[in-house]
Image (spheres, rainbow, N blue to C red):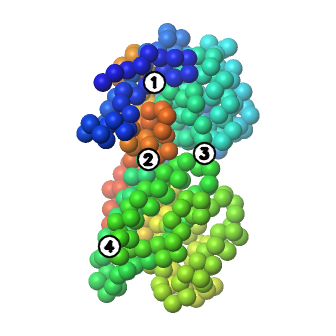
Amino acid sequence: MTTAAPTRRQVLVGAVSVGLLAACGEPRTTTASTNVSPRAATVEVLLDATATQPPGTTPMAELVAKALPDAAVTSHRAHADQAKQLQTAADRGIGLVVLQSIDTQAIGKAIKKAADDGVQIIALDAIPQSHQGLALVLGWDEFSAGEKEIAAVAKEMARRTSERPPHHIELFAGAPEDLRAKGRFDGEAFAMKALSKEGSLIVKSGQTSFQTAAVAPGSHEAFVQRLTTTFEVTYPRHTLDALVMPGDAYRSTVEATCRKLKRKVPLLLGSGATVDGVKAVAAGTQFSTIYRDPAPLASRLAKVVAAMQEGRSIAYNPKTSYRNEVRSVPGVFLLPTLVTKATGGAALAGNPVLASLLKP
């Protein structure tokens, strides 16, 4: 394994490329090395105060403040404020910034400015559209979560012996600009390939690209229209067995649309682990949701920052990074928890609000 000397723009360099790993049969996890200037002992954390997280979890700001007690932690509600603080980091003597972007599309310019000034930047949770200037990305392995969703619903369909295949599923995804939503969708689409080939579970509409599956935030009427069209055009006679929703909040809309069209509500796969979503999973009106507890992210962040400050290697998986839309910098991704009725409260262990909702 070789490492590259750090530059002002990139101080964290992967040892081996994804292509070389595949060709040489290297293990899936490799390491990245970093040399950190003494000024990087000064750490600042810029968080998104508008970001949502599951009920019953500790706020990210509190978790990070505890994990990095010597860091200055600030939460912003406006992109402009966050970008200004990032751009002035070097002038204020900050060597390392942990950034949870408010606007992943617009933050690129501020990241590049700070990196050009010698600041190292870790993207936390939200993945900026531009990776230029980033040292590392620490977030969720949405691709693997998508794979697990499809595997679980395929198993459920196979269990229903009275319903003969093929079974039909349709995939709706999150916001077009959200790389996390794209990672989840790509994992679902990847898992669907083998199932479609064998004819057990198929997307009858043929809409298997993220561009057609993505749902812009707040576009309720557009989502209803697309869902209605899917039923009327693709399923005039066949049954839609399962539907992947962008999030738990879409369940009531799907149910209302099905009532209006006099259609059976399909198995619903959600995301976000809201109280309503988990209650619906417990009641059987929703098949699954995805739980992302920020505590493991904060814990891993503390380890990553310590390693960077001490010049130690950081383990990461190039293949996982690539699948989660991070292709030019190292990425450390944690697997979210897939919650179904079968998993019970154990899937939400440690969450005082949600765990009890799934107990028998």
| Residue hosting label 2 | 323
Q: Which residue is denoted by mark 3 in the rendering?
A: 51
Q: Secondary structure at mark 1?
A: strand
Could you tell me which residue is drawn at 63 percent across and 26 percent down?
112
- Which residue is rendered at x = 44% and y = 60% of the image? 188
**Residue kind at label 3, given as amino acid type:** Ala
Q: Nearer the viewer, mark 4 or mark 1?
A: 4
Of the residues shown, which amino acid type is indicated by label 1? Answer: Leu
Q: Which mark is residue 198?
A: 4
Q: Quadrant of residue 316?
A: top left
Query: Secondary structure beneath disc 2?
Result: helix
Q: Tag 2: residue type?
A: Arg
Closest to the camera, between mark 4 and mark 2, is: 4
Label 3 to label 2, Cα distance in Å?
23 Å
Q: Quadrant of residue 113?
A: top right
Residue drawn at (38%, 20%) of the image: 3
**Residue placed farthest to the right in the image?**
80
Callout 3 touching callout 4 (CB < 8 Å): no
Q: Say which label, 1 or 2, has the lower sequence index.
A: 1
Q: Give the structural element (helix, strand or loop) at label 3.
A: loop
Of the numbered discs 4 and 2, the one sitting upstream in the chain is: 4
10 Å crowding of disc 4: few (<14), some (14-19), many (20+):
few
**Res. 55 in view:** no
Quarter occupied by the N terminus: top left
